Amino acid sequence: MEPQLEEIYEFIRMALRSVGAEVTSPWFYFQFGLILIGAGIAHLAAVSLRSRVDLTSVAMGWPAAFRLGLRVLVRDAGFGFFAGLMAMTRVAMVASTWPSRSYLLVVAANLAAAWLLIRLATSLIRNDTAVKLVSITAWCVAALSILGLLDQVTAALDSLAISFGGHRLSLLLAIKVSALLAFALWLANVAGNFVDARISTLNDLTPSVQALTSKLVRILFICLAVVIVLAAAGVDLSALAIFSGAIGVGIGFGLQKIVGNFVSGVILLADKSVKPGDIVTIGDSHGQVRAMNTRYISVTGNDGREFLIPNEKLVTERVVNWTYYDTNTRIDVTFSTSYEADPRRICEIAARIAKATPRVATVKPPTCSIVEFGEHSMRFSLSFWITDPEKGMGNVRSQVMLALWETFRIEAAADTTYPIRDIRIDEAPAAAPAVEAHLR
């Protein structure tokens, strides 16, 4: 057995004997009772404080960090009251008895104060899961330090290690790297959000260039965070070279689609063929591009549905971009009239109706033309333009068609009804009886 492990086991045996001796002492139960009483009083005081303090009115106008800190102080005020009560009880106990008879009160006060300080420090983190994970981990480390067990636990974790290729990987190193990496990635995310906010204010950059720059800066921050953490933890970066072959094979086989979508996303952001805010039609999906990510784009349809379309599909398949050069979009409406109507007057009326419809652009006037002489009617095509296709195209087409129907009915300029056909089927005469030929 290694010397470090023997020292750890010996420390654990001594600690267990010490705990066993303390449990048999009546002062242990006396302190435990004081802790329970103090916890009850602190809880009642915290409930009374929360019912009397209105955070909205008190913290109005304060900076965001101070508002979050005040919210934590009021919500976890019970720990502060408990730590204060235990500290005052400790002072009274030391003045009247031996200090060794009130050590448990000091431990309880320090643990409560450590939790309150940790909650204040983590109040700036917006993710609830991350707050709980960081708070519990930090409090466990603080508790080990308060109890005097941090060095022994650290030595035990460091003794659990494996060696390969001249490198030593211990459980302690893995925990340190994981904690530092999580903190560094959080800082990289905060920095990325800050850069995104600043880039979005640069009006001289197109939306696609803004999105591309934001993605590249965020990826750069993440790569820097990983490299800095590994270097700070003492990890030899040259040891990671042995994994490059496996990563290359994984990219070639398992991650082929992911890499393809990532490269396609970079191409789309660079050539600006599709950018946020465009109205696109991709297969059966039609809507407005809301966001462009490294793997897919988000297209919002007129019915509120979100279509998540892989970037590779936009590069390899046909894409209809209604607002590629500008937002001017043409809409065609076809209708039919009887031969009794004057086609020239029909064209004039249809163009006038489209021009009077809201949202129809006046830069390019509406045009109407006859396109076909059908069997029972003449067919017309009405074309007009709109400048805001993101507000919908079907609703404008419907308004124009309703206005055409109402105007033709009122002015009797055209008969838009179709002829009615009556089909009569007469019963066929009974078939003559078959003549059978018999060979004699």
Image: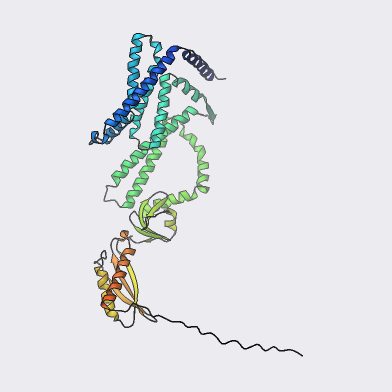
Can residue 326 be seen here? The reply is no
**Can you say whether 419 is above or below 172 in the image?**
below
Evaluate whether residue 146 shows in this view.
yes
Residue 352: image location, x then y, percent: 25, 72
From the viewer's perspective, tell me whether residue 336 is left or right of residue 173: left
Residue 51 vs residue 28, the one in the foreground: 51
> In this rendering, is residue 273 above or below 153?
below
Return the residue found at the far right. 440
Coloration of the structure image: rainbow
For the point 40% across and 26% down, which residue is it?
139
User: Where does residue 118 sit, x and y in percent of width and height?
Assistant: 36, 28
Q: In which quarter of the image is residue 278?
A: bottom left
- In the displayed structure, would residue 295 be above or below residue 391? above
Q: Which of 295 and 415 is in front in this view?
A: 415
Q: Where is residue 329 in the image (x, y as percent from the top left)?
A: 31, 64
Picture residue at 65% right of the left edge, 87% below the top = 434
| Residue, far left | 61
Query: Left of 296 or right of it: where is 201?
Result: left
Q: Quadrant of residue 331?
A: bottom left
Left or right: residue 220 compared with residue 168: left
The quarter of the rendered structure image containing the C terminus is bottom right
The image quadrant where one finds the N terminus is top right
Residue 248: give x, y in percent of width and height. 50, 44
Residue located farthest toward the bottom when viewing the structure as drawn: 440
Q: How many marks?
A: 0
Q: Nearer the viewer, residue 382 or 33?
A: 33
